[in-house]
Image (tube, rainbow, N blue to C red):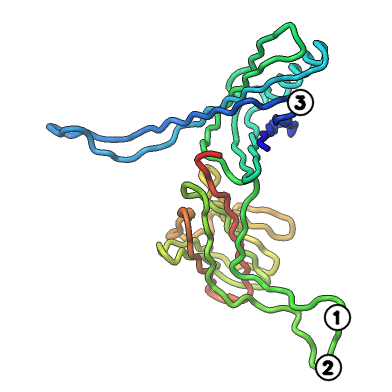
Amino acid sequence: MRKVTYVNAKGVSIELSNTAPFLLQKIETTNNVTIYNSKGVNQDGRTYLGNTLNERDITLTVMLLAKSKDELTAYRDEINAIFNPKYGEGYLIYKDNVKERKVKCLINKMPFFKITDTSYDDCLISMTASNPFWTDIDESKEEIALWVGDFSFELELTEDGIEMGHREPSLIVNVFNGGDVECGMRVEFKALATLTNPSILNVNTQEFIKINKEMIAGETITVSTYFGNKKVRSDLNGVTTNAFNYIDVGSTFLQLDVGDNLFRYNSDTNLDNLEVTIYYMPQYLGV
């Protein structure tokens, strides 16, 4: 079954599917490409330089099914209230039997109704996604360095003691980007005890992110490389501070290429005290 759910900036949602009262009839999307090129003197044709995707336009065709004219009026009011362009950007969530994805979008015109003299009506809902890519609903997660618990209940203690946990031996993790284009990520460095200058390295490109700072037990430093949301912050004892000034000048705000991405973590001292987690959201051209 195919359905879409719209969640506005107020957190109010509405589901459009193949059941009453809001019957989803059609989803249409358009997404133009801007091509960049140059032309030299006496050159036949042009030289291709690159391209970018423009914003995505989305149109939903919905039938309102009611038992009376008064109920139909109430449904129209509900549509207008939820798809209110004055609220700003909301999320459109698409779900079928195979996948579930979302896109951030803005209502670009008021919902259009035919205003029929019956107990049903057709409605057109138009919206624009400034970022044209669909994403997964939640971030994916890959842990590079962590401690794993080794005991369970019922617990039996012996004279020789027991091993409460062990350190994962691998220093390298493969982060697979299953999307259609490269995407940003969120790297989380967590200190179990004192360590200095944590870093993460892309094994293939040799690009890296390094934090020039001594971390203490319980401190977490998060580096976001998402487009339009690049930041570095430190969290310790419930207090969040800007840590952008600690990032090494040679660092790159790493992006995940489509497919496999190998990363290695490190620190200048006390490597065993470091846990590293990578969060990311693949980006898709469609649903």
Q: Quadrant of residue 148?
A: bottom right
Q: Amino acid at mark 3?
A: Ala
Residue 184 coordinates in the image, percent (x, y): 52, 50
- Kindly report which numbered mark, 3 or 1, lies closer to the viewer in this rendering: 3
Q: CA distance from mark 1 to mark 2?
A: 13 Å
Q: Nearer the viewer, residue 86 or 59?
A: 59
Q: Crowding near pointer 1: few (<14 within 10 Å), some, many (20+)?
A: few
Residue 250 coordinates in the image, percent (x, y): 42, 60
Residue 20 has which mark?
3
Residue 97 vs 32, above or below: the answer is below
| Name of the residue lying farthest toward the left | 42
Q: SS for tag 1?
A: loop
Q: CA distance from mark 3 to mark 1?
A: 54 Å
Q: Nearer the viewer, residue 280 or 20?
A: 20
Residue 256 coordinates in the image, percent (x, y): 49, 54
Which is nearer the N-term, disc 3 or disc 1? 3
Residue at the disc numbered 1: 155
- Seen at 74% across and 29% down, the residue is 19
Which is nearer the N-term, disc 2 or disc 3? 3
